[in-house]
Image: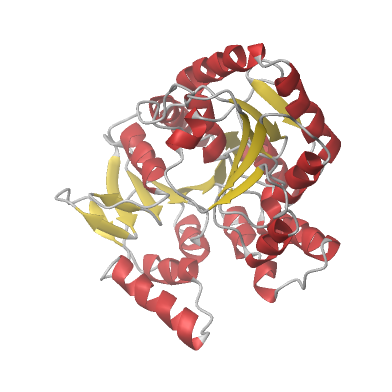
Amino acid sequence: MSKKIKVSLYTIADLGELKNLKSDYARAIFESLKDNISNVYCRDYKGNDPRFKKIVLGGKIIFQIIYLFKKFFHIRVDIYSVLDFFAYFKKDDANIIIFHPYSFRRTCQKFNRMGKITINIGTSATGRMISDMNKQEFLKYGFNFPQEYKADHLEKSLVSSKYIISQSEYCKSTYVKAGFKPENIFVLTGGIDTKKFKPGEKTDNVFRVLAMANCGLLKGFQYLLEAWSKMDLKRSELVLLGNPSKEMQVIFNRYKSFKNIKFIKHSDPIDFYHQSSVLVHPSLSEGSSRVIKEAMACGLSVICTENSGSIIRNGIDGFIIPIRNTEAIKEKILFFYNNQNKILEIGKEARKNIEKNGTWDNFSGKMSEIVSEIINKNLRK
C-alpha cells in the first residue's frame, strides 16, 4: 500500500491500556494498516500515541453516566448515535475511512460526500434480519416482543458505506438482501488469541456438552435444551455457561429438574473448554462467534449452525447444522457420545484450522490485502 494513502479508523473500542469486547478487533485493524494510519478515533484511550483520540471528551465515563440515566430514569439514548454525533464533527484528511463496527451512519455519509473511500466492518446480520428472527422466537415461545428490538439503524449504517467487510458469508447474504452490491462486499472473519486459548487436559471421563453465551433467544439454547431432554446418556452432563436474558431464564426454569443440566453464570471459560467433550453453538444469527473460535483453539470439537459465522469444515473439525433443528443437534451429540474416540482427533483438526485461518496475524494480513484491493478498484475507475 502506498505511503501516500492515509487511513482513519473510527471504532467503539477502548484502546491502549484499556480494553472492551471490540478492542482485539480494532487493534488488529490498526496493526494491518499502521504504516498508513493517520487517526484512530475510539471510545476511550489510555496511552501515548498521538494518533489515538477519544471520540467524546471524557471517554467511557460519559457512557457510564448515560447508562445510569437509561437505567434509573428510563431515558432512551442510543450510545452508537452519541458516538456518531460527535464523530460527525471530526476533521479528517484521510483517503480511507474505516468504521468498526457499522454504527457511524451520518459520519459515513459526510465522508462519502467528500469523495473519500468508506469501509464498514459488518459484525452481524442486518438489523432487520435480527429483528425478524427475534420476533419469530418471542412469539413462538409466548413472550411479548419489545419495541427496542425493532430498530434498524445498523442496517442504515451499512448501506451508507461504499464497501463492507463482512464477518461471514451468512452476514454478507443479509447485506445483499438489504440492497448492497455483492461485488463491494468482502468476507473476513475475526481472529483469536491462540496463546491464551490452547488445548488442556481433561481430568474426568464425563461426556460433557458445553454451550456458552450471554444468551437471548437468538442464541438458540432452547433448541439445545429440547434436544438434550430427549436423550438419556449415562455419565454425561450439559453445561450452559452465561448470563441469560429474562426470556431465556423462563425457558431455563423449565429444565431445572434435570440433574445432568448445569446452569452457571458467566466466568472464565478456559477451564470449561478443557473439561468439555464438545461445544454446541445453536445460534440463529451471529456475525462470527468468538466462542466457537475459542473452543477450536482449545482443541474442542464443535457443533454449530450455518448462521454462526464459523470457519468449521463440516465433518472434519466439527459439524454444521441448520438453525432451529432439534433433531440435528441430537444426532450430532449422539455421534460424539457413541464415537468418543473421535473427539480428540476432531479437536486436533479444529486447532490446526484455527492456527492456519483464525489468528489475529492471519486477519491482519488479509485485511491489508482487502484494503489494497479496494484502493486498486478505485484507481481503475
* Quadrant in which the C terminus appears: top right
For the view shown, which residue lies furthest in the left direction? 48
Q: How is the image coloured?
A: secondary structure
Q: Nearer the viewer, residue 220 or 76?
A: 220
x and y percentages locating residue 165 in the rendered image:
54, 40
Is 153 or 194 nearer to us in this picture?
A: 194
Residue at position x 60%, y 58% in the image: 244
Quarter of the view holding residue 211:
top right
Whether residue 34 is visible, yes or no, is: yes
Q: Is residue 324 left or right of residue 257?
A: right
Q: Is residue 206 left or right of residue 92?
A: right
Image quadrant for the N terminus? top left
Number of callouts: 0
Q: Residue 4 placed where, x, y %?
A: 29, 36
Q: Name the residue nearer the viewer: 284 or 337.
A: 337
Judged left or right of residue 263, residue 28 is left
Q: Indicate the position of residue 171 as horizontal and vertical percent values.
A: 66, 43
Q: Nearer the viewer, residue 154 or 206?
A: 206
Does 217 appear above or below 207? below
Q: Residue at x 51, y 59 (%)?
A: 103
Q: Is residue 273 above or below residue 123?
A: above
Find residue 273 and report its horizontal and vertical position in percent.
50, 32
Query: Is residue 326 depicted above or below 335 in this figure?
Result: below
Is residue 179 visible in the rendered structure shown here?
no
